[in-house]
Image: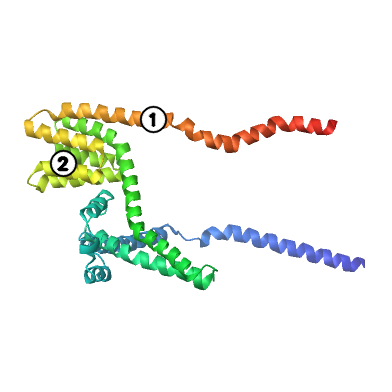
Amino acid sequence: MAIADLGNNNLFVVILTLLAVSGTAYTLLLPLFERDELKSRMKSVALERDKIRSRERNRLANSKEVERTSLRNNPKESVRNFVDKYNLKNILLSDIIIKKLKMAGYRGSAPLYSYLFLQVILPIGFFVLTFTCLKVILKSDISFFGVIFISLIASAIGFYAPGIFIQNQISKRQETIRLAWPDAMDLMLICVESGMSIEAAFKKVAEEIGVQSAALAEELVLANAELSYLDERRKAYQNLAERTGLDGVKNVVIALAQAEKYGTPIGSALRVLSDENRQARMQEAERKAAGLPPKLTVPMMLFFMPVLFIVIIAPAAIQVMQTF
């Protein structure tokens, strides 16, 4: 037993010695076998950079081609054929729809064709979907005429859905323009008083105000373009007012048109209108703040008052229950 234990101990010592010698040799010889990978890494990075550059150039070239075609803003061929085949322009189209599409920021023929196409397809789709759900999938006990009536209601919702969507987009767009317009007026006043023309002022303000309101920047750029190529500058101002549909913009447009017509200084008119727009925004904020207490009355009665009554009455009710 002693000889066997001694042999096992010697074997254990030999294994540990071999491991220690191997680790020491590996530590000492490893730097001799290491290669300088900096050049290879830099070379791989350069190759990857070249690949990215070529890929981005191809993507940019393709995107430019897409932009050239998208600037035409043509509708899809199937949508155009459907609208033209059934002569939906003469049936459904009106000046109000065109005006609303412009106010919502949708320009060109593609949004117009899409609007008319959806105004016909959605009622049919809603009718078929509602009828199928009630009669086939759910197998409702409603009579056949009741299912038809509900399907007609869904069809009417589908008919008015595009108009509701456009009106919602107009409201969102006008809200962003309304909030950014006083700041744009201040920037415009600074530009005009520094000696810039109204075109240069529009361009500069569009560049600065784009972070706050992309819609306002878009309208100012479009107005600047119309001032350059339209015969009557007054028409460009009127188009700006019609596309926004805001009273503050209309007042500024009228002031600019009158200033150019009678030769009065634009800076003084912009200063007065800038103060008025800022005061109007402040009054709107005060009006919303004043209307907040009545709006909070119902939530307080529904959510706060019951909890308050429970907190106040619960201890007394517990004491009464323990007493009796």
As helix, strand or loop, the secondary structure at mark 1 comes to helix
**Applied colour scheme:** rainbow
Quadrant position of residue 37: bottom left
As helix, strand or loop, the secondary structure at mark 2 comes to helix
Amino acid type for the residue under numbered disc 2: Tyr
**Which of the two residues, 34 or 294, is positioned nearer the viewer here?**
294
> For mark 2, what is the residue?
237
Amino acid type for the residue under numbered disc 1: Arg
> For mark 1, what is the residue?
287
Quadrant position of residue 309: top right
- Dot in front, 2 or 1: 1
- Residue 124 location (% of width, % of height): 37, 68
Q: Is residue 164 above or below residue 133?
A: above
> Quick one: quadrant of the N terminus?
bottom right
On the question of residue 193 being in view, the answer is no
**Which of the two residues, 213 or 175, is positioned nearer the viewer here?**
175
Q: Is residue 284 above or below residue 90?
A: above
Q: Residue at 11% x, 41% y: name it.
A: 234
- Residue 119 location (% of width, % of height): 31, 62
**Which of the two residues, 161 or 216, is positioned nearer the viewer here?**
161
Distance from label 2 to label 1 (Cα)?
30 Å
- Residue 99 location (% of width, % of height): 23, 51
